[in-house]
Amino acid sequence: MTVWPLKFRERRDGKFLLTDDAGGFFLSDQSFLERYVGNNLSSADQTFLRENGHSFEWEGDPDWTAFAYRWARRQSKQQELSYVILVPTLRCNLTCGYCQVSRAPETAQGFDWSEETLNGALRLIGAMKGPRIKVEFQGGEPLLRVDLLEQIRSFARARFPGSQFVVCTNLQRLGEREWAYLDQADTFVSTSLDGDRNTHQRQRTNDDATTDAFFNNLADAVRRLGPGKVSALPTIDVDEPPDFEELVGNFERYGIQSIYLRPINHQGFARRRRSDPHSIAKWNKLHSSFIDYLIDQNHRTGRYVEEYYFSQCLRRFLRSGADDHVDLRNPNFFASDYIVIDHDGQLYPTDEARMLSRIGRVDLSIGTVTAGIDQAKIQLLNHASLNNFDPDCIHCAYQPFCGTDVVDDLSRDGRIDLVRTDTWFCQRHMRLFDKVIEVISRRDEPALRSVAKWARVPSWGDHMIPVHT
Amino acid sequence: MIPLRLKIETDAVDPYVVRLRSCEGMPEPLANVSSLDAALATADGEKALFTGAAGSLHLFGIDPSEVDGDVVFVVPWRKTAHRLIRANSRHNTLLITERCDQLCVMCSQPPKKQHVDMFPFFETAVLLAPENSTIGLSGGEPTLFKSELFEFLRKTMKQRRDIDFHILTNAQHFERDDRAKLRDLDLSRILWGVPVYSSDSTIHDHIVGKPGAFDQVRSNLSLLCEAGAKIELRTVLMKPNAPGLLDLARFVTAALPFIDTWAIMQLENIGYGRKNWHSLFFDNSLGFDLVSKALDFSISRGIDTKLYNFPLCTVPADYRAFAPSTISDWKRAYVEDCVDCSLRNECGGFFEWHPKVHGYGRFGVA
Ligand code: SF4
Ligand code: SF4
C-alpha cells in the first residue's frame, strides 16, 4: 500500500490536522504522526488511510483514480471570458477616505469613456461566447454615466440569452432615470455600507445630510427592487471597527444576511496611510471575533447571518468545485473568465491591479480595449499564479484549499518572490483556515447550528469530521 | 393505472413497430419515418382503426386521443400492442432483456431465463420518440448484451441528437477495452444508473446475490469514470444496509467522488421487494438518524444527494429539500391520511402497488 503524502498542522489543543494534496483531511494525534513519519503504520492506521482515501495499491487502481479525480477537481481551470468589470467613469460624487485613488472629482474632465473606448468595450463583449454573461459596473460612481450603462445593457441583452448586470453604486444621488435603470429583473445593486451609521459617516459620507440621503436611498432600493436584489459590503478600518451588533443589525434591516467584511483597501492612498506591520494580526483577530460573535448572535435570534468569505473558505475546505470564488482559487489564471476595462480603455486582470497601476506602483495593465489583450504579459503573471510549487505552500496543510494573489503581493511588497508565510495573503488565509478548523470541531449547539447553515447542510456534528487515533 | 398493453387486431403477420397518430395539427413527422406512422381513420365507442404503410390496425378499449404519438410494438398473433413509448410520459423505459446475473433481494422485476432480442424494434421506436425525450433502458441486465447495446446506442444517438438515455445497469460487465467504445458515444447524453448498496462488500454481495459483485462494480465504476461517463449511484435503503449508510457516504465521497448524483431510494413493494418486505423494509420515519448523517456528510463534500420515493412527511423538515417527488404520476398513489396534507403538492406519495397499511410508524404532517 502506498500512502499519498500527508501534511499536518498542529492545533492549539495538541491535536493534528492532516491533509493530502487532493483535499482529503482528518484529525489525529502526535502518536499517529510519529507512526506515519517513522514508517510504522499499524494495520488500523492502514485501514483508516485506505477508507479515508489516502492510499492506493497500484497506479491506476480505483483508489488511485478516485484520488486523481479529487485532485483534479481541486485545480481551477482556464475558462471562457464571461464576466466584465467596466469602469465607465472615474468621477464620483463622494470622497471616501479610503478611495481617493480610484476616483476623480465629479466635475473633472477626461475621466470618462471615450466614444472609442465604448465601441471597444462593445466589441469585446460582443466577442464573448455566452450564452450567459455578467457585467459589473464599477467606478467612480457609474450611475453618473447612466447613458453608457444603458447602451451596454441593451447591447448585451440583445446579444446574449442570459445576461446579468451589477451596478456598484454609492446610492447617493438617484434620479428617475437612475432608478428606472436599476429597477429591472436582470439588474442588481451592490453598495457600500460600512457597518453602523457613525462609521459610515466617518468613512464615507462626512455629513448628516449626505448620510441621511444614503440610508434613505438604501431603504428605497430594498423596497423598490425587492429582496435579493441589493447587496452591500462593509469596508472595515481595523483601528476603528464598527460595533458588531449595530453592523449586523444594519445589514439585517436591509434584508442582507451575507456580510463580506473587507479590510480597508491597502492599494492606493490608504496604503501609504496605514503601513502598520501588525495590522494583519489585528485584522485576523477582529475577523475571528466577528465569527464568534455571529455564532452567538445567530443562536440567539434563530436567524443565520454569515460572513461571506468565511463561509466560502469553510465550503472550500469541505468540498471542491462548486464555490470557485475569484478571490480564492488555484491556479488563479488571469484574464481567463473575467477582465476589467478602465475609464481610459486600459485592460486589467483585476480591480486591484487597476488601482495598483493607477498609483504608479507597477503597470499591471494587460492591453487596451482597442488593441486587445497582451497575452505575453498574462503568461508572465500566470506563471507565478499558482501555489502548487511554492516552496512554502508545498509544506502547508492548507495548500489544496488555499489560493494565491500575485497582485496583492506586488501591492504590499513590490515583488512576488517572497517567503510566503510573511505575506498578508498567507497570514490572512492561514488564520482563516485555522478558524475554520476550530469552528467545525466545536461541539456546542450554537456552533453546530451556524456551521451547518454556513456549510449548507441540514445539520452538523461529530460524524462530519473524520478522526483517527 | 395506465394500460401498457392494448388489445388489437391486424391483418399483418409479423410483429412491427408503428407510431399512432390520432390528432390533426400534429407537427409534421420526420420525412424518413413517416412511413412508420399509422393514422386514425375511424373510431367508435369501442374500437379505433388506424391505417398506414404497415396495413390496418384495430385498437380496442382505448380513447384514440390518449395514444396519439405513442410508439407501439404490434404482435399480431397475440393480438396485443405494447406501448413502448407513451408520448405524454417523461418516463419511458425499454426492457432490453429479462436475464440478469445478479439476484437482488428486493428485485422489482425478478429475472427470467429466456431472452428475446428486441433491439431492431427498439431502434425503430427510438427514432419515432417525441422530441427531447429521455429513454430509459433497463432489464434484467442490459449489458449482458453489451455489443448489441453499444451498437444500438451508436446508431440511435447519431440519428436522434435530441434524445438522452438513462441506462440502469449493475456495471458487472464492462472491460477496459470498452472505454474506447464508450468514448465514441456522446456520453453527456447518457446517465448510467448503477446500484451500490453498501461499502461493506459482504453486505453488498449478499443483497445482490452474487459473490464478488462489489469488487467488480467498484472497478467498473472507476472505468466509467475514466471514460467520462455520467453516473447516478443508486442505493435502495433496507434493513440490511441502513446501519452502514454513513459508511457508504464516506465511501462515496472518498472512492466515488466522480458520480453525478447519489440517489438513496425507499423500497418498492413489488416483486421480491413484496415477498421479502418484512425483512427488508426500513422505516425511515423512526430511524432517520441513519439517513440524515449520511446525507449531511455527502452533501457537505459536494455530492449531489437525493432521497427518492420517500413520502415527505416521513422525512424531517430540514431534509425535505433533498426529497424530490420522484414517483411518476401514472404510478403514484396517496393513502387516506394524505387527504388534508399541506405537503401533497410537493410529495411523490407512494407507488400505487404500495399496501394501504403503509408501514411508517410516524406519518402525516401535524
Ligand atoms: S499561502 Fe500560506 S496558507 Fe496558503 S497555502 Fe501557502 S503557505 Fe498555506
Ligand atoms: S401525508 Fe401523504 S401527501 Fe402528505 S407528506 Fe405524507 S405521504 Fe405525502
Image (cartoon, coloured by chain):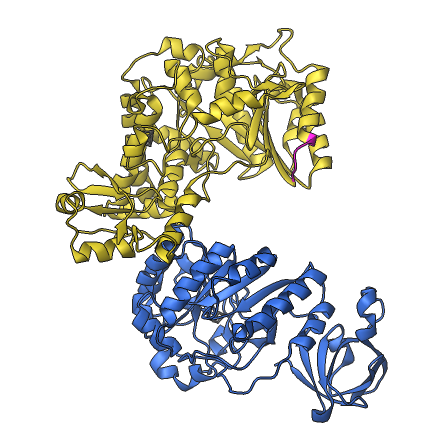
Chain colours: A yellow, B blue
Q: Nearer the viewer, residue A322 or B48?
A: A322
Where are the magenta residues, as a range? A126-130
Q: Is residue B70 above or below residue A262?
A: below
Q: Is residue A95 visible?
A: no
Q: Position of residue A305 (x, y in %)?
A: 39, 39
Q: Position of residue A309 (x, y in %)?
A: 40, 34
Q: Nearer the viewer, residue B109 or B356?
A: B109
Q: Is residue A172 above or below residue A336?
A: above
Left or right: residue A104 compared with residue B198: right
Magenta stretch secondary structure, dominant: loop
Left or right: residue B134 compared with residue B253: right
Looking at the rendered image, the quarter that the C terminus of chain B falls into is: bottom left
Q: Nearer the viewer, residue A137 or B188?
A: B188
Residue A236: quarter of image: top left
Residue visible at 32% across and 31% down in the picture: A393
Residue visible at 22% across and 51% down in the picture: A467
Q: Is residue B24 above or below residue A271?
A: below
Q: Position of residue B6 (x, y in %)?
A: 70, 86
Residue visible at 43% across and 25% down in the picture: A384
Residue visible at 69% across and 69% down in the picture: B126
Q: Is residue B117 visible?
A: yes
Residue farthest to the right, as pictured: B41
